[in-house]
Image (spheres, coloured by chain):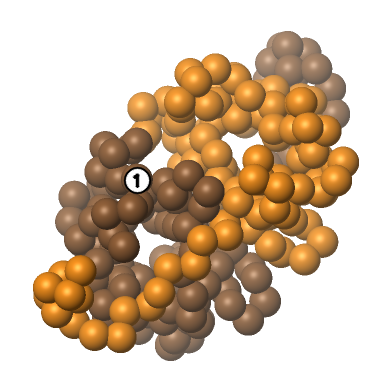
Chain colours: A brown, B orange
Amino acid sequence: MDAELDFDKLGGLIPAVVQDASDGEVLMVGFMNQQAFDLTLSGGYVTFFSRTRQKLWTKGESSGNRLRLTSVTTDCDRDTLLFRVEVEGAGLVCHRGTRSCFTEPLPLAASEPAVRKEIR
Amino acid sequence: MDAELDFDKLGGLIPAVVQDASDGEVLMVGFMNQQAFDLTLSGGYVTFFSRTRQKLWTKGESSGNRLRLTSVTTDCDRDTLLFRVEVEGAGLVCHRGTRSCFTEPLPLAASEPAVRKEIR
């Protein structure tokens, strides 16, 4: 099964979207190499490969907010993963103490980009 | 605003998760370079940078199933984007004719990985 995933497209890594199984909120995106993927499926908890630290990293291993798998899906070209999870512990996925890492809204542009640049 | 996003971490690209604004379904993941991001925000429709074709690609430009932005969020380290969208046209995002690209369920492992390898 593992061999069918396309790890080559991104130099050995696959982006992994983590979604709350209960309400569909997107909680975070991380990257997995083959080993992280194997550990995630065998252990039942999401383990990433940290690009900044260059090591495996089981999300929540210190905070207790581990991500327990309820389902795993890949996409049509098998180069991305979608994990639906239940968040254990306090249910706070982000190290900043929020439920999701996606906490920074960006304004939708109402005008032409060149104009915005002049204003900035 | 654009300069605050971290395009460097992945060689000029940022992964972009596309989620249906109406029900939270994750529809697809693509990649954006700075130009694709600017075009997406200025035009109001999701434009990716295709890694395989090495060119900009406005999702749905030929099928009509364009992805109209309702909100854009970035995460705590500003290296990932989450787009909530309304799907226009027939509402089918995947080129295979399905609503989402995430159509391939993977089995959750029930046994130890080494054992699975021997069986395979």
Residue B19 horizontal side relative to residue B56, left or right: right
Identified at 34% across, 36% down, the residue is A9
x and y, in percent, of residue B15 in the image? 50, 41
**Type of amino acid at the residue the image marks with label 1:** Asp
Pinpoint the chain carrying mark 1. A
Q: Nearer the viewer, residue B26 or A58?
A: B26
At label 1, counting other C-alpha atoms closer than 10 Å, the crowd grade (few under 14, some 14-19, many 20 or more) is some
Q: Is residue A15 above or below residue A47?
A: above
- Would residue B3 be visible to someone looking at this image? no
Looking at the rendering, in which quadrant would you find the N terminus of chain A? Answer: bottom left
Give the quadrant of residue A50. Answer: bottom left
Looking at the rendering, in which quadrant would you find the C terminus of chain A? Answer: top right
Q: Nearer the viewer, residue A118 or A74?
A: A74
Residue A48 horizontal side relative to residue B89, left or right: left
Residue A120 horizontal side relative to residue B115, left or right: right
Identified at 55% across, 68% down, the residue is A19
Q: Is residue A65 above or below residue A17?
A: below
Identified at 30% across, 71% down, the residue is A40
- Which residue sits furthest front? B119
Q: Which residue is mark 1?
A: A6
Q: Nearer the viewer, residue A70 or A1?
A: A1
